[in-house]
Amino acid sequence: GAVVSQHPSWVICKSGTSVKIECRSLDFQATTMFWYRQFPKQSLMLMATSNEGSKATYEQGVEKDKFLINHASLTLSTLTVTSAHPEDSSFYICSAQVGVANQPQHFGDGTRLSIL
Amino acid sequence: GQQLNQSPQSMFIQEGEDVSMNCTSSSIFNTWLWYKQDPGEGPVLLIALYKAGELTSNGRLTAQFGITRKDSFLNISASIPSDVGIYFCAGLSSNDYKLSFGAGTTVTVRA
């Protein structure tokens, strides 16, 4: 149980393109999902908390107009990197929380984004 | 969230050896979690701890939630090649339910 699916697993695109990444909870409903960014050999950095039916909460320093988050249903959150540039290249990972708030987050397999 | 102090940063071990790593924090957590991440993949939950003093096992893995609620350790017994990867500790805050991660421990097993 507690499977989180992330798609696509990797993307290569030209600078200026907008890229959408999907995060789905396959066998449970998730009112809260989280989006992280991870640079090579580093830990996960929380970008934003995605709440079903309401606006996402962004961490300090994360541009909300750059990283658009939509959580339209209890099983799907999307992250759109708008007008992506090479410095946006990174490993993006989503997670979803099962049940009540003190339960573990379960992670997707990540999306490798490379902007040329 | 804050970054937790996780050590060691990396370790090279012989197959069959036991592995131990720990995490400390300046803040109290209500839940401690241990994840393993393989290259190019997302972290996979290994063990979740919910009570101070709790000792939990998952196969060859054992983890404990420190009494002070500010630390946790993970032990791997009789390591095998597939134990290679990066292990992250994470604390869950009851204030905002966000995860704070350690910097990770990279484990390399020599056959």
Image (spheres, rainbow, N blue to C red):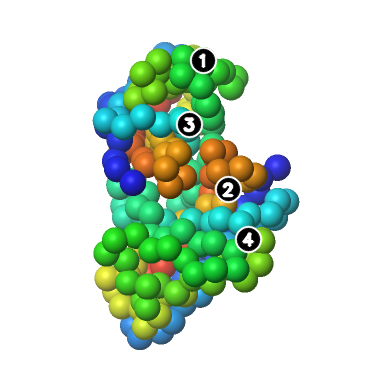
Crowdedness of circle 4 by 10 Å Cα count: few (<14), some, many (20+)? many
Task: Provide residue A80's location: percent of width, then percent of height.
Answer: 47, 75
Nearer to us: label 2 or label 4: 2
Q: Which residue is labeled 4 in the image?
A: A24
In this rendering, the answer to whether A66 lies above or below A62 is below
Task: Provide residue B82's location: percent of width, then percent of height.
Answer: 51, 31
Q: Quadrant of residue B68?
A: top left
Q: At label 1, which amino acid type do we have?
A: Leu
State the CA–CA distance, disc 3 to disc 1: 13 Å
Crowdedness of circle 2 by 10 Å Cα count: few (<14), some, many (20+)? many
State the CA–CA distance, disc 2 to disc 3: 13 Å
**Dot 3: chain letter:** B
Task: Provide residue A90's location: percent of width, then percent of height.
Answer: 36, 62
Residue B31 shows which numbered tag?
Answer: 3
Are both tags, 1 and 4, on one chain? no
Near-viewer residue (A69 or B10): A69
Are both tags, 3 and 1, on one chain? yes
Q: Quadrant of residue A12?
A: bottom left
Taking the view exactly as shown, the residue that stands out farthest to the bottom is A16
Q: Residue at left 27%, top 30%?
A: B26
